[in-house]
Image: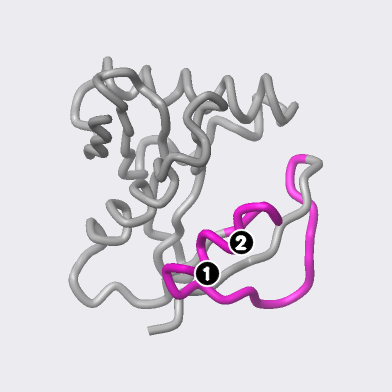
């Protein structure tokens, strides 16, 4: 199995990212489409492929608070194969030198994965797009 995660530099790859997110978030998790498509321009996007087939996506962006990792999506057939872990690792390694306050909003079932990378839950559980989340912050 050849798993590759690359930063998106071409419009056709961005289309693949959006297609994955539509399937996972809008179709599968019933997220409202109008909540799904935002902050695309200022985000740095990543596409995961398995043997050339698009299977996962994520992005990071600079916010007023720091650096936010978000929109982690892995296609159903590829879950449990290390795609999410590879996406997180690549996104983290792409952050600028000295990036401070790295955070994300995790769905409950993904928290243990982010914890492996040093993210710790903070604050109260909350709902976003009808799904329960915790904010998680990376401890340096």
Q: Colour scheme of this structure image?
A: one colour
Q: Position of residue 41 (x, y in %)?
A: 36, 36
- Which is nearer the eye, 64 or 60? 60
Q: Which residues are magenta?
A: 105-129
For the point 51% across and 27% down, which residue is it?
A: 75
**Disc 1 on helix, strand or loop?**
helix
Give the SS element for disc 2. helix
- Residue 70, how many percent across, how many down? 49, 49
Label pair 1/2, CB-CB below 8 angstroms: yes
Which quadrant is the C terminus positioned in? bottom left
Residue at 52% over, 24% down: 77
Quadrant into which the N terminus falls: top left
In the image, residue 9 lies at what x, y percent? Answer: 19, 30
Q: How many marks?
A: 2
Q: Residue at x 48, y 71 (%)?
A: 65
Is residue 7 depicted above or below 19 in this figure? below
Judging depth in this view, the residue of 32 and 133 nearest the camera is 133
**Observer-nearest residue: 61 or 70?**
70
Question: How far apart, in angstroms, are the residues tagged by discs 1 and 2?
Answer: 6 Å
Which residue carries the number 1 mark? Answer: 115
Q: Is residue 120 above or below residue 68?
A: below
Residue under numbered circle 2: 111
Classify residue 29 as left or right of residue 89: right
Drawn side of residue 94 relative to residue 73, left or right: left
Who's the residue at 25% across and 19% down the image? 52
Badge 2: how crowded within 10 Å, few (<14), some, or many (20+)? Answer: some
Q: Which of 43 and 121 lies nearest the eye of the viewer?
A: 121
Tell which residue pokes out farthest to the front in this image: 1
Q: Position of residue 67 (x, y in %)?
A: 40, 64
**In this rendering, would 81 be left or right of 79?**
left
């Amino acid at each position: 199995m050849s798993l590759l995660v690359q930063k998106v530099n071409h419009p056709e790859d961005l289309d693949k990212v959006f297609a994955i997110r539509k399937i996972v978030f809008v179709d599968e998790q019933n997220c409202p489409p109008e909540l799904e498509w935002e902050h695309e321009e200022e985000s740095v996007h990543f596409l995961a492929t398995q043997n050339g087939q698009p299977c996962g996506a994520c992005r990071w962006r600079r916010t007023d608070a720091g650096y936010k990792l978000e929109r982690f999506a892995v296609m159903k057939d590829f879950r449990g194969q290390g795609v999410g872990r590879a996406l997180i690792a690549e996104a983290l390694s792409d952050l600028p030198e000295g990036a401070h306050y790295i955070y994300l909003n995790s769905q409950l079932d993904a928290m243990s994965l982010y914890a492996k990378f040093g993210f710790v839950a903070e604050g109260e559980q909350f709902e976003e797009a009808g799904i329960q989340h915790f904010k998680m912050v990376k401890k340096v």
